[in-house]
Image (spheres, helix red, strand yellow):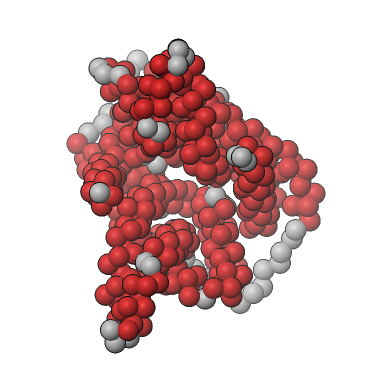
């Protein structure tokens, strides 16, 4: 006798749309945490550069922790710590907070490298021309140092975009979580994962090629 | 606001289990790096010296490894291959996934390393009567190894951090074990906090050992 209930249904066009939506959520959480993390990271990088010994003793070890502990542990830890502190965060908020701090920790080092890439004589020259400290930062350090570390920053940003897949552990339905949901229903892991992988690849590959091209051009 | 009772005793009691699990983590990460170095070396050489299908496969490998999330890669080896009736054990999933990923990243490092060694050295070695194998293993690769030593160290750290994703494919390394123990006693925060510390210490030990090794290996 034919079973009257269908447990598993095939992949349909609406499922592909479901994945597309999820890809946008991946993009959303990535863009949000990368932009906030970059802002904080640049500030931390500036502190590391200017605050010499004090920052090296206080800020650097803190940032180091976020680079030496697996992201997934950070996520689980923070997600379980928030209620203890009396915060009521949903997976998206928790994920964004941790991804932001994680990005900031990575960007801080990149930014410090950027500050160090600008020679002191150039900066002294800028100051002697009558520029204020912040004019010097804005018109001298940013263009020169920023250019030096831009490819490295893109590497960090792409890394965070890919690592945002880990937020699925908390239950936020981004691309990878969506693919898992679909696999459970359709029982076609290979096809679904191939589509999800194609989305990630489409998000990451053009940017990484662009960065490689820039790096090559600037190296000349 | 702070009315949560921390209970650390179950964690202290299961510390031996956690240490044992961290050995599993180290084991799988070290194995993945060794295999990753070998495969990465082959990929880099194939991409530089060959044409046709071999080169396409190597390029596809490197780009896929670098442009999709590690977690996606683990899921792919874990569930995606199930569509073809290949069911890997959790250990194999993590090992294959990490090797695939590390090989892709290391291949790019090796390529950069090989490009930094002038062609003339290879030709000089060949005209001294060395075979191609001798020229590579005695002249080129030792120099490349010196250049990529630092990236390999970083990759080793990454492999340890990435192996934490094993907990999502049912592998009982440090994170998986922690999750198992935490779900038994329901002291999630305490367990993961201790695990975070263990990861931090492991990473620091790896960096220290690699620095000592470098002092021993690269002295003139």
Quarter of the picture containing the C terminus of chain B is: top right
Vertical comparison of B144 with A99: above or below: above
Quarter of the picture containing the N terminus of chain B is: bottom right
Place of residue A76 in the rendered image (x, y in percent of width and height, measured from the top left): 54, 54
Q: Residue at x 48, y 39 (%)?
A: B147
Place of residue A102 in the rendered image (x, y in percent of width and height, measured from the top left): 47, 59
B25 sits left or right of A141 in the view: right
- Given the current orientation, which residue lies at the most extreme front position? B128
- Given the current orientation, which residue lies at the most extreme left position? A13
Name the foreground residue: B26 vs A88.
B26
B85 sits left or right of B150 in the view: left
Q: Is residue B204 visible?
A: yes
Vertical comparison of B34 with A85: above or below: above
Vertical comparison of A165 with A63: above or below: above
Place of residue B143 in the rendered image (x, y in percent of width and height, measured from the top left): 49, 33
Vertical comparison of B110 with A79: above or below: above
Q: Quadrant of residue A124?
A: bottom left
Name the foreground residue: A123 vs B109.
A123
Q: Residue at x 23, y 39 (%)?
A: A16
């Amino acid at each position: 006798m034919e079973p009257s209930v269908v447990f598993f249904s095939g992949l349909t066009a609406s499922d592909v749309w479901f994945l597309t939506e999820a890809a946008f959520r991946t993009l959303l959480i990535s863009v949000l945490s990368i932009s906030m993390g970059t802002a904080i990271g640049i500030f931390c990088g500036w502190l590391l550069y200017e605050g010499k010994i004090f920052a090296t003793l206080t800020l650097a070890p803190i940032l180091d922790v976020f680079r030496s502990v697996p992201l997934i542990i950070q996520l689980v830890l923070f997600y379980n710590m928030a209620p203890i502190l009396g915060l009521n965060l949903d997976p998206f908020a928790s994920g964004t907070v941790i991804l932001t701090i994680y990005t900031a920790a990575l960007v801080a080092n990149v930014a410090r490298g950027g500050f160090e890439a600008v020679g002191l004589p150039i900066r002294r020259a800028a100051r002697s021309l009558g520029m204020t400290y912040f004019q010097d930062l804005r018109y001298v350090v940013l263009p020169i140092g920023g250019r030096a570390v831009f490819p490295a920053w893109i590497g960090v940003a792409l890394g965070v975009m890919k690592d945002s897949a880990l937020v699925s552990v908390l239950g936020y339905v981004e691309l990878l979580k969506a693919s898992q949901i679909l696999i459970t229903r359709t029982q076609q892991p290979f096809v679904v994962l191939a589509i999800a992988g194609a989305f990630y690849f489409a998000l990451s590959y053009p940017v990484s090629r662009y960065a490689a091209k820039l790096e090559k051009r600037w190296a000349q | 606001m702070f009315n949560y009772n921390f209970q650390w005793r179950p964690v202290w009691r299961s510390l031996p289990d956690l240490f044992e699990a961290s050995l599993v983590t180290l084991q799988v990460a070290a194995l993945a790096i060794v295999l990753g170095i070998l495969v990465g070396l082959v990929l880099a050489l194939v991409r530089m010296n060959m044409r046709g299908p071999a080169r396409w496969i190597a390029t596809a490998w490197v780009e896929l490894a670098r442009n999709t999330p590690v977690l996606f890669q683990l899921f792919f080896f874990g569930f995606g291959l199930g569509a073809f009736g290949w069911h890997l054990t959790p250990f194999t999933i993590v090992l294959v996934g990490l090797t695939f990923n590390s090989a892709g990243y290391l291949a790019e490092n090796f390529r950069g390393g090989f490009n930094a060694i002038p062609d003339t050295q290879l030709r000089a070695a060949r005209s001294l009567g060395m075979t191609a194998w001798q020229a590579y293993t005695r002249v080129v690769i030792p120099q490349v190894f010196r250049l990529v030593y630092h990236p390999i160290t970083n990759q080793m750290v990454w492999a340890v951090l990435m192996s934490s994703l094993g907990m999502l494919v049912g592998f009982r390394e440090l994170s998986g074990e922690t999750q198992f123990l935490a779900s038994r006693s329901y002291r999630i925060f305490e367990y993961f906090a201790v695990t975070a510390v263990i990861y931090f210490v492991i990473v620091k030990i790896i960096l220290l050992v690699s620095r000592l090794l470098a002092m021993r290996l690269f002295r003139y």
